[in-house]
Protein backbone atom coordinates (compact mmCIF):
# COMPACT_ATOMS: atom_id res chain seq x y z
CA UNK A 1 0.00 0.00 0.00
CA UNK A 2 2.78 2.41 0.95
CA UNK A 3 4.64 1.49 -2.23
CA UNK A 4 1.55 2.21 -4.34
CA UNK A 5 1.00 5.56 -2.59
CA UNK A 6 4.65 6.57 -3.06
CA UNK A 7 4.51 5.64 -6.73
CA UNK A 8 1.31 7.67 -7.19
CA UNK A 9 2.88 10.75 -5.55
CA UNK A 10 6.02 10.37 -7.69
CA UNK A 11 3.94 10.01 -10.84
CA UNK A 12 1.82 13.06 -10.05
CA UNK A 13 4.92 15.11 -9.25
CA UNK A 14 6.51 14.11 -12.56
CA UNK A 15 3.28 14.82 -14.44
CA UNK A 16 2.82 18.28 -12.93
CA UNK A 17 6.45 19.22 -13.61
CA UNK A 18 6.16 17.99 -17.18
CA UNK A 19 2.88 19.88 -17.64
CA UNK A 20 4.37 23.10 -16.25
CA UNK A 21 7.41 22.83 -18.52
CA UNK A 22 5.17 22.07 -21.47
CA UNK A 23 2.93 25.02 -20.63
CA UNK A 24 5.95 27.32 -20.23
CA UNK A 25 7.35 26.20 -23.58
CA UNK A 26 3.94 26.63 -25.20
CA UNK A 27 3.61 30.16 -23.83
CA UNK A 28 7.11 31.09 -25.02
CA UNK A 29 6.68 29.62 -28.48
CA UNK A 30 3.18 31.04 -28.95
CA UNK A 31 4.50 34.60 -29.44
CA UNK A 32 6.52 35.36 -32.58
CA UNK A 33 9.22 37.56 -31.05
CA UNK A 34 11.88 36.49 -33.55
CA UNK A 35 9.72 37.46 -36.51
CA UNK A 36 8.78 40.78 -34.88
CA UNK A 37 12.46 41.51 -34.22
CA UNK A 38 13.34 40.61 -37.79
CA UNK A 39 10.80 43.09 -39.18
CA UNK A 40 12.10 45.95 -37.01
CA UNK A 41 15.71 45.20 -37.93
CA UNK A 42 14.80 45.22 -41.64
CA UNK A 43 13.06 48.59 -41.22
CA UNK A 44 16.21 50.04 -39.65
CA UNK A 45 18.63 48.55 -42.20
CA UNK A 46 16.85 48.56 -45.57
CA UNK A 47 17.58 51.53 -47.88
CA UNK A 48 14.43 51.76 -49.99
CA UNK A 49 11.59 53.82 -48.47
CA UNK A 50 8.83 51.94 -50.28
CA UNK A 51 10.11 48.55 -49.09
CA UNK A 52 10.62 49.94 -45.60
CA UNK A 53 7.02 51.14 -45.37
CA UNK A 54 5.75 47.83 -46.75
CA UNK A 55 7.66 45.89 -44.08
CA UNK A 56 6.33 48.30 -41.46
CA UNK A 57 2.75 47.45 -42.47
CA UNK A 58 3.58 43.73 -42.13
CA UNK A 59 5.06 44.41 -38.69
CA UNK A 60 1.95 46.30 -37.56
CA UNK A 61 -0.30 43.48 -38.76
CA UNK A 62 1.76 40.80 -36.98
CA UNK A 63 2.07 42.79 -33.74
CA UNK A 64 -1.68 43.39 -33.70
CA UNK A 65 -2.24 39.64 -33.99
CA UNK A 66 0.30 38.88 -31.25
CA UNK A 67 -1.11 41.40 -28.78
CA UNK A 68 -4.64 40.05 -29.22
CA UNK A 69 -3.53 36.61 -28.07
CA UNK A 70 -4.44 35.34 -24.62
CA UNK A 71 -1.68 36.08 -22.10
CA UNK A 72 -0.15 38.89 -24.18
CA UNK A 73 -0.33 41.45 -21.38
CA UNK A 74 1.67 39.34 -18.93
CA UNK A 75 4.08 37.93 -21.52
CA UNK A 76 7.48 39.66 -20.97
CA UNK A 77 8.46 40.20 -24.64
CA UNK A 78 12.01 40.53 -23.28
CA UNK A 79 13.47 39.11 -26.50
CA UNK A 80 11.94 41.98 -28.46
CA UNK A 81 15.18 43.96 -28.32
CA UNK A 82 14.65 46.08 -31.46
CA UNK A 83 11.51 47.74 -30.11
CA UNK A 84 10.80 49.94 -27.09
CA UNK A 85 8.48 48.06 -24.70
CA UNK A 86 7.49 50.13 -21.65
CA UNK A 87 5.24 49.32 -18.69
CA UNK A 88 4.52 51.79 -15.85
CA UNK A 89 4.92 50.79 -12.20
CA UNK A 90 1.18 50.15 -11.75
CA UNK A 91 0.98 48.03 -14.94
CA UNK A 92 -1.98 50.09 -16.17
CA UNK A 93 -0.88 49.59 -19.78
CA UNK A 94 2.02 48.53 -21.98
CA UNK A 95 3.52 50.48 -24.87
CA UNK A 96 5.09 48.91 -27.97
CA UNK A 97 6.89 51.68 -29.83
CA UNK A 98 9.38 51.89 -32.72
CA UNK A 99 10.82 54.30 -35.29
CA UNK A 100 10.78 54.20 -39.09
CA UNK A 101 13.69 56.27 -40.52
CA UNK A 102 13.20 57.74 -43.99
CA UNK A 103 15.79 58.58 -46.64
CA UNK A 104 15.14 62.33 -46.43
CA UNK A 105 16.31 62.30 -42.80
CA UNK A 106 12.82 62.42 -41.28
CA UNK A 107 11.27 59.76 -39.04
CA UNK A 108 7.88 58.11 -38.69
CA UNK A 109 6.87 56.36 -35.48
CA UNK A 110 4.39 53.70 -34.42
CA UNK A 111 2.94 53.04 -30.98
CA UNK A 112 0.56 50.32 -29.76
CA UNK A 113 -1.00 50.57 -26.30
CA UNK A 114 -2.22 47.38 -24.60
CA UNK A 115 -4.53 47.63 -21.58
CA UNK A 116 -6.17 45.04 -19.36
CA UNK A 117 -9.95 44.97 -19.64
CA UNK A 118 -12.83 43.17 -17.93
CA UNK A 119 -13.64 41.33 -21.15
CA UNK A 120 -10.06 40.78 -22.26
CA UNK A 121 -7.19 42.98 -23.31
CA UNK A 122 -7.88 46.27 -25.10
CA UNK A 123 -5.52 47.28 -27.91
CA UNK A 124 -5.23 50.91 -29.05
CA UNK A 125 -3.11 51.86 -32.06
CA UNK A 126 -2.10 55.51 -31.69
CA UNK A 127 -2.68 57.60 -34.82
CA UNK A 128 0.39 59.78 -35.45
CA UNK A 129 0.40 63.40 -36.52
CA UNK A 130 3.39 65.44 -37.66
CA UNK A 131 4.44 67.81 -34.90
CA UNK A 132 5.48 70.40 -37.50
CA UNK A 133 1.89 70.59 -38.82
CA UNK A 134 0.32 71.44 -35.44
CA UNK A 135 -1.24 74.91 -35.64
CA UNK A 136 -0.53 75.74 -31.97
CA UNK A 137 2.69 75.95 -30.02
CA UNK A 138 3.79 72.35 -29.46
CA UNK A 139 4.46 72.98 -25.76
CA UNK A 140 0.73 73.78 -25.40
CA UNK A 141 -0.70 71.10 -27.68
CA UNK A 142 -3.28 68.68 -26.22
CA UNK A 143 -2.98 65.27 -27.83
CA UNK A 144 -4.94 62.02 -27.65
CA UNK A 145 -5.01 58.56 -29.22
CA UNK A 146 -6.23 60.05 -32.53
CA UNK A 147 -3.76 62.94 -32.52
CA UNK A 148 -0.54 61.47 -31.21
CA UNK A 149 2.58 63.70 -31.41
CA UNK A 150 4.70 60.81 -32.60
CA UNK A 151 8.04 60.00 -30.97
CA UNK A 152 10.14 57.17 -29.60
CA UNK A 153 9.73 56.73 -25.83
CA UNK A 154 12.58 55.36 -23.74
CA UNK A 155 11.52 55.93 -20.11
CA UNK A 156 8.26 56.05 -18.17
CA UNK A 157 7.75 57.54 -14.69
CA UNK A 158 4.49 57.12 -12.74
CA UNK A 159 3.20 59.97 -10.55
CA UNK A 160 -0.10 60.76 -8.85
CA UNK A 161 -1.49 64.20 -8.03
CA UNK A 162 -4.97 65.70 -7.53
CA UNK A 163 -6.40 62.16 -7.45
CA UNK A 164 -5.16 61.52 -10.97
CA UNK A 165 -2.36 59.33 -12.24
CA UNK A 166 0.11 60.88 -14.65
CA UNK A 167 2.58 58.86 -16.69
CA UNK A 168 5.62 60.95 -17.62
CA UNK A 169 7.49 59.72 -20.70
CA UNK A 170 10.88 60.75 -22.03
CA UNK A 171 10.64 61.12 -25.81
CA UNK A 172 13.15 61.29 -28.67
CA UNK A 173 12.50 62.50 -32.23
CA UNK A 174 15.13 62.32 -34.98
CA UNK A 175 13.14 65.09 -36.76
CA UNK A 176 15.33 65.83 -39.83
CA UNK A 177 18.89 66.23 -41.11
CA UNK A 178 19.36 69.56 -39.31
CA UNK A 179 17.73 69.17 -35.90
CA UNK A 180 16.71 66.60 -33.33
CA UNK A 181 14.19 66.97 -30.55
CA UNK A 182 13.52 65.57 -27.12
CA UNK A 183 10.54 66.30 -24.94
CA UNK A 184 8.84 65.24 -21.74
CA UNK A 185 5.40 63.85 -22.57
CA UNK A 186 2.54 63.10 -20.18
CA UNK A 187 -0.10 60.39 -20.64
CA UNK A 188 -3.26 60.38 -18.52
CA UNK A 189 -6.81 59.06 -18.72
CA UNK A 190 -9.97 61.16 -18.44
CA UNK A 191 -13.18 60.16 -16.63
CA UNK A 192 -14.27 58.09 -19.61
CA UNK A 193 -10.98 56.21 -19.63
CA UNK A 194 -9.84 57.94 -22.82
CA UNK A 195 -6.12 58.56 -23.30
CA UNK A 196 -5.00 62.21 -23.17
CA UNK A 197 -1.53 63.69 -23.78
CA UNK A 198 0.03 66.78 -22.25
CA UNK A 199 -0.68 68.14 -18.75
CA UNK A 200 0.11 71.45 -16.96
CA UNK A 201 2.34 69.82 -14.37
CA UNK A 202 5.62 71.53 -15.37
CA UNK A 203 6.39 74.66 -13.38
CA UNK A 204 9.06 77.18 -14.34
CA UNK A 205 9.78 80.39 -12.46
CA UNK A 206 7.80 83.38 -13.83
CA UNK A 207 6.48 81.35 -16.75
CA UNK A 208 3.11 79.81 -17.55
CA UNK A 209 2.98 76.09 -16.97
CA UNK A 210 3.74 73.93 -19.98
CA UNK A 211 1.90 70.82 -21.12
CA UNK A 212 5.27 69.42 -22.16
CA UNK A 213 8.84 70.84 -22.17
CA UNK A 214 10.45 70.55 -25.62
CA UNK A 215 14.18 70.67 -26.40
CA UNK A 216 15.49 71.34 -29.92
CA UNK A 217 19.13 70.97 -30.90
CA UNK A 218 21.59 70.29 -33.72
CA UNK A 219 21.43 66.89 -35.40
CA UNK A 220 25.23 66.81 -35.12
CA UNK A 221 25.07 66.61 -31.33
CA UNK A 222 23.59 64.33 -28.68
CA UNK A 223 21.55 65.58 -25.73
CA UNK A 224 21.37 63.68 -22.45
CA UNK A 225 18.02 63.49 -20.68
CA UNK A 226 17.21 60.84 -18.09
CA UNK A 227 15.38 60.24 -14.83
CA UNK A 228 17.40 60.15 -11.60
CA UNK A 229 15.30 58.02 -9.20
CA UNK A 230 17.49 58.70 -6.15
CA UNK A 231 16.77 62.45 -6.46
CA UNK A 232 13.35 62.04 -8.09
CA UNK A 233 14.13 64.41 -10.92
CA UNK A 234 14.53 64.45 -14.70
CA UNK A 235 18.02 65.73 -15.52
CA UNK A 236 18.91 67.13 -18.93
CA UNK A 237 21.68 69.01 -20.73
CA UNK A 238 21.37 72.77 -21.03
CA UNK A 239 21.19 73.78 -24.70
CA UNK A 240 22.63 77.00 -26.10
CA UNK A 241 23.41 78.43 -29.58
CA UNK A 242 26.99 78.78 -30.78
CA UNK A 243 26.58 82.54 -30.36
CA UNK A 244 23.80 84.93 -29.35
CA UNK A 245 23.04 85.93 -32.96
CA UNK A 246 21.87 82.36 -33.65
CA UNK A 247 19.26 82.34 -30.90
CA UNK A 248 16.19 80.43 -32.11
CA UNK A 249 18.10 78.77 -34.98
CA UNK A 250 18.09 75.30 -33.45
CA UNK A 251 20.43 73.58 -35.90
CA UNK A 252 23.17 75.58 -34.12
CA UNK A 253 22.14 74.61 -30.57
CA UNK A 254 24.31 72.17 -28.65
CA UNK A 255 24.69 70.96 -25.04
CA UNK A 256 27.15 72.89 -22.89
CA UNK A 257 28.71 71.55 -19.68
CA UNK A 258 25.75 72.42 -17.46
CA UNK A 259 22.57 70.56 -16.64
CA UNK A 260 19.09 71.53 -15.49
CA UNK A 261 16.29 69.39 -14.11
CA UNK A 262 12.63 69.00 -13.32
CA UNK A 263 12.26 67.74 -9.75
CA UNK A 264 9.01 66.17 -8.56
CA UNK A 265 7.48 68.45 -5.92
CA UNK A 266 4.47 66.47 -4.64
CA UNK A 267 2.03 67.79 -7.26
CA UNK A 268 4.13 68.87 -10.24
CA UNK A 269 7.55 68.84 -11.91
CA UNK A 270 9.42 71.97 -10.79
CA UNK A 271 12.28 73.41 -12.84
CA UNK A 272 15.62 73.37 -11.05
CA UNK A 273 18.93 74.85 -12.18
CA UNK A 274 21.65 72.41 -11.16
CA UNK A 275 24.76 74.53 -11.79
CA UNK A 276 24.99 78.30 -11.36
CA UNK A 277 26.92 80.64 -13.65
CA UNK A 278 30.06 80.68 -11.49
CA UNK A 279 30.25 76.91 -11.47
CA UNK A 280 29.56 76.88 -15.21
CA UNK A 281 32.53 79.20 -15.82
CA UNK A 282 34.84 76.93 -13.82
CA UNK A 283 33.66 73.85 -15.70
CA UNK A 284 34.00 75.62 -19.05
CA UNK A 285 37.68 76.29 -18.30
CA UNK A 286 38.24 72.68 -17.23
CA UNK A 287 36.51 71.41 -20.39
CA UNK A 288 38.67 73.62 -22.64
CA UNK A 289 41.87 72.47 -20.91
CA UNK A 290 40.78 68.84 -21.20
CA UNK A 291 40.02 69.24 -24.91
CA UNK A 292 43.46 70.79 -25.48
CA UNK A 293 45.13 67.81 -23.78
CA UNK A 294 43.03 65.35 -25.80
CA UNK A 295 44.00 67.08 -29.07
CA UNK A 296 47.69 66.92 -28.10
CA UNK A 297 47.40 63.23 -27.23
CA UNK A 298 45.61 62.45 -30.50
CA UNK A 299 48.07 64.32 -32.71
CA UNK A 300 51.24 63.46 -30.82
CA UNK A 301 53.69 65.95 -29.33
CA UNK A 302 53.63 69.39 -30.98
CA UNK A 303 57.34 69.85 -30.31
CA UNK A 304 60.14 68.08 -28.48
CA UNK A 305 62.55 69.90 -26.17
CA UNK A 306 66.26 69.48 -26.90
Image (spheres, grey):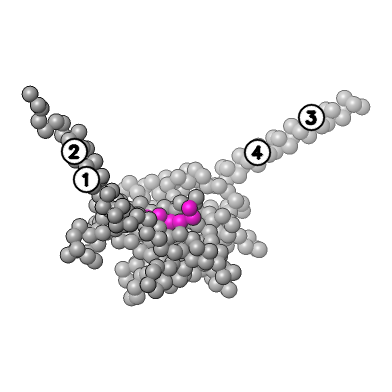
Instruction: Please state the horizontal and vertical placement of residue 194, each as a whole percent of the image.
Output: 54, 70
Q: Residues within 10 Å of mark 3 (few under 14, many from 20)?
A: few
Q: Secondary structure at mark 2?
A: helix
Indicate which disc, 2 or 3, sits on the residue closer to the N terminus.
3
Range of the magenta residues?
Answer: 231-236
Indicate which disc, 3 or 1, sits on the residue closer to the N terminus.
3
Locate residue 153: give its quadrant.
bottom left
Location of the C terminus by quadrant is: top left
Instruction: Please state the horizontal and vertical placement of residue 276, each as a whole percent of the image.
Output: 33, 57
Q: Main secondary structure of the magenta part?
A: strand
Identify the residue position indicated by label 3 in the image. Answer: 10
Q: Is residue 231 above or below residue 3?
A: below
234 within the magenta span: yes
Identify the residue position indicated by label 4 in the image. Answer: 22
Quick check: 82 left or right of 31?
A: left
Q: Residues within 10 Å of mark 2 (few under 14, many from 20)?
A: few
From the image, state whether disc 4 or disc 3 is nearer to you: 3
The Cα atoms of the two marked residues, 3 and 1, are separated by: 73 Å
Labels 3 & 1 near each other (Cβ < 8 A): no
Circle on res. 295? 2
Q: Secondary structure at mark 3?
A: helix
Q: Secondary structure at mark 1?
A: helix
Identify the residue position indicated by label 1 in the image. Answer: 288
The Cα atoms of the two marked residues, 4 and 3, are separated by: 18 Å
The Cα atoms of the two marked residues, 2 and 3, are separated by: 72 Å
Instruction: Please state the horizontal and vertical placement of residue 264, each as a whole percent of the image.
Output: 49, 61
Regarding residue 84, the answer to whether it shows in the image is yes
Amino acid sequence: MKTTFAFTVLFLSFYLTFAQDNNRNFQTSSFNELELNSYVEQILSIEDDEQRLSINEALKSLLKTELQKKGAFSFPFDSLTSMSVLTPADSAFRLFNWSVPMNDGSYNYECFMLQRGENGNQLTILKPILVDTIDVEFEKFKGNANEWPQALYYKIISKETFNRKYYTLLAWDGHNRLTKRKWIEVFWFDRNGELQMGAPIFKQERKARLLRPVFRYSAQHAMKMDYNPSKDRIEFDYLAPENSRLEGVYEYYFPDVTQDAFRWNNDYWEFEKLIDNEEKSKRDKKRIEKQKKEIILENGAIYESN
